[in-house]
Amino acid sequence: DTEVTQTPKHLVMGMTNKKSLKCEQHMGHRAMYWYKQKAKKPPELMFVYSYEKLSINESVPSRFSPECPNSSLLNLHLHALQPEDSALYLCASSQDGAVDHYGYTFGSGTRLTVV
Amino acid sequence: AQSVTQLDSQVPVFEEAPVELRCNYSSSVSVYLFWYVQYPNQGLQLLLKYLSGSTLVKGINGFEAEFNKSQTSFHLRKPSVHISDTAEYFCAAFSGNTGKLIFGQGTTLQVKP
């Protein structure tokens, strides 16, 4: 299995809703990442988990809450989002975040619309 | 500052013509360099990577890139493009200092019939 699987593919939520994005990989990778991508822009790093511990938080607002239940799963919990949070949310994984230079494997993303 | 610069935001080209997408990196980032492709409404797919060794790197879908240390460049080339190559292309460099992948702003390749 050489894929990163993200669910759901599309999500529409109101500003008072609570929802979660899910990411799964079975490649034995020990680093997992959340990125946010606006249209025609490069991905922006949000969070990095290395060996199931949060290692990087790019000053993301607290309405985004990551969770890494085990080495194969990464969740992003969403609460009280704003319309400007509408974007493509990408999950990625790599062998070892601290020293990895073999490239990341990206999922297909969740297209999030906040109404 | 660590940076990756893609010199063209859009590159229009006719089908079966050659194409070059340009990428320059700052000397302060490591020389672990990557090209990713993103098709509409999809995630990023790794096209090719340079870690060490031969400066000419071959990737998937007929793409290749050449690492040039003196010019701090990593340009992507394809001798004959297809309509299906229409996509967004991102050059990226891994920063050993921060442990992060630094992306360029992207180049939209538009292949016309």
Image (cartoon, rainbow, N blue to C red):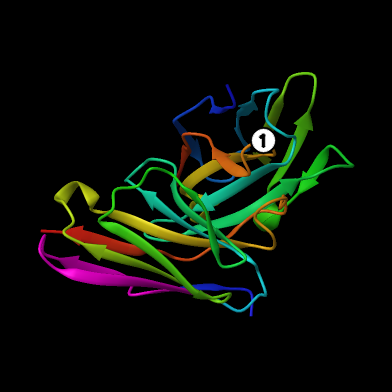
Q: Tell me if residue A69 comes above or below residue A89 in the rendering.
A: below
> Residue A96 in the image: x percent, y percent?
69, 59
Q: Can residue A12 be found in the magenta stretch?
A: yes
Q: Tell me if residue B93 comes above or below residue B9 in the rendering.
A: below
Q: Tell me if residue B99 comes above or below residue B74 in the rendering.
A: below
Q: Residue at x 25, y 56 (%)?
A: A63
Q: Residue at x 36, y 41 (%)?
A: A40
Q: Tell me if residue B44 comes above or below residue A39 in the rendering.
A: below
Asked if residue A51 lies left or right of residue B50, the reply is left
Q: Residue at x 72, y 48 (%)?
A: B49
Q: Residue at x 59, y 45 (%)?
A: B16
Give the magenta-colored segment's residue range: A6-24
Q: Nearer the viewer, residue A76 or B40?
A: A76
Asked if residue B26 lies left or right of residue A54, the reply is right
Q: Can residue A106 be found in the magenta stretch?
A: no
Amino acid identity at mark 1: Asn
Where on the picture, by quarter, is residue B72? top right
**Residue B81 seen in the figure:** no
> Residue A87 in the image: x percent, y percent?
29, 53
Where on the picture, by quarter, is residue B101? top right
> Residue B97 in the image: x percent, y percent?
67, 35
Q: Secondary structure at mark 1?
A: loop
Q: Residues within 10 Å of mark 1 (few under 14, many from 20)?
A: few
Residue located farthest toward the right when viewing the structure as drawn? B53
Q: Which residue is mark 1?
A: B97
Q: Quadrant of the C terminus of chain A?
A: bottom left
